[in-house]
Amino acid sequence: MAKPIMIANWKMNKTAKEAHKFTAEFIKIVKDVEGVDIVICPAFTAMQATADGLQDTNIKLGSQNMHFEEQGAFTGEVSPKMAAEFCHFVILGHSERRRIFGETNEFINKKVKAALENSLIPILCVGEDEEEREAKNTKNVLEHQLKACLKGVAKDDAHKLVIAYEPIWAIGSGKIATIAQIDEAQSFINHVLDTMFGEEIEKKIRTVYGGSVTHENVAELMKKDSVDGCLVGHDSLNAKDFAAIVKYKDILAKEEESEEKKE
Ligand code: PGA
């Protein structure tokens, strides 16, 4: 299994001051955690404060978005190079960007390639909405999004990718997908990646789940081989809650202990 990765997507939350407070509390709890990559994606205005707060830790920063152009007249945008000054990762194709800001697969594809050219690791979000799921269209939607957003990505780069399966109906709704739905979708994503890049590379690409993940349901999710980590919105805003998610192995160990006691 690829190294697990837990990603906090703070969305449009937290000022610089609040970010600093979070990092101080968070690193105290997770300082000894090993074997999990941790990524925090703050708003750009809180990027420096978050970077300062995470200094001398292995916790990485991610950007919530970026433009694909190198520089120029794009009011309000941030270039890949600017994002790369702080970040190792960049979330691309989040459903909120697709729906509220009209980003298309073609547009996202340009961003994916620009990110890779600037040594940023794309966390590419894909997922179906409620209507598409009900019409049994989930697989078609996922395949189309993956193929269109990853068009032209070289095999040499593909292994670095993180793919986030985020069913739109499960985001911010408190309505998490069932483990069977998640496993089916993520296994299908792996199958598509296999046809695009070959099995060896597919095994290296991390596939994470996002949509109403909490410290209470994370352990169940992480039991599935197809799930290499989580992309967390709401439950990542509180340092204790996100730390508990990062430390999901502790929850699994406790479960095992109580099972043994029962026997
Ligand atoms: P949520 O958001 O955890 O609040 O559902 C997840 C996401 O949008 O990435």
Image: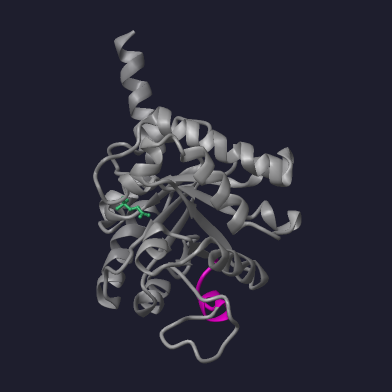
Q: Residue furthest front?
A: 135
Direction top: furthest residue: 263
Quadrant hosting residue 257: top left
Horizontal and vertical percent position of residue 188? 56, 35
Q: Does 118 lie within the magenta span?
A: no
Residue 33, given in percent of the width and then of the height, sits at 44, 48
Q: In the rendered view, how is the structure colored?
A: one colour
252 displayed left or right of 113: left
Q: Residue at x 31, y 14 (%)?
A: 261
Q: Say whether residue 117 is visible.
A: yes
Q: Where 88 sits versus 183, above or below?
A: below
Is residue 51 rendered to the left or right of residue 147?
left
Examine the rendered structure and indicate whether residue 213 appears above or below residue 84: above
| Residue at point 41%, 32% (across, down) | 181
The image shows residue 139 at horizontal and vertical percentages of 51, 38
Q: Residue at x 34, y 25 (%)?
A: 255
The quarter of the image holding the N terminus is top right
- Can you give x and y, in whole percent of width and height, for residue 142 in the image? 52, 45
Pick whichever, 131 or 203, lies toward us.
131
The quarter holding residue 52 reads: bottom left
Q: Which contiguous range is marked in magenta?
A: 80-88
Q: Is residue 185 above or below residue 66?
A: above
The total number of labels drawn is 0
Mark yes or no: residue 4 visible: no
Q: On the rendered image, what quadrant is the C terminus found in?
A: top left
Specify whether residue 81 is painted magenta.
yes
Compare residues 17 and 184 and report the one nearer the observer. 184
The reply, left or right, for residue 46 in relation to residue 32 is left
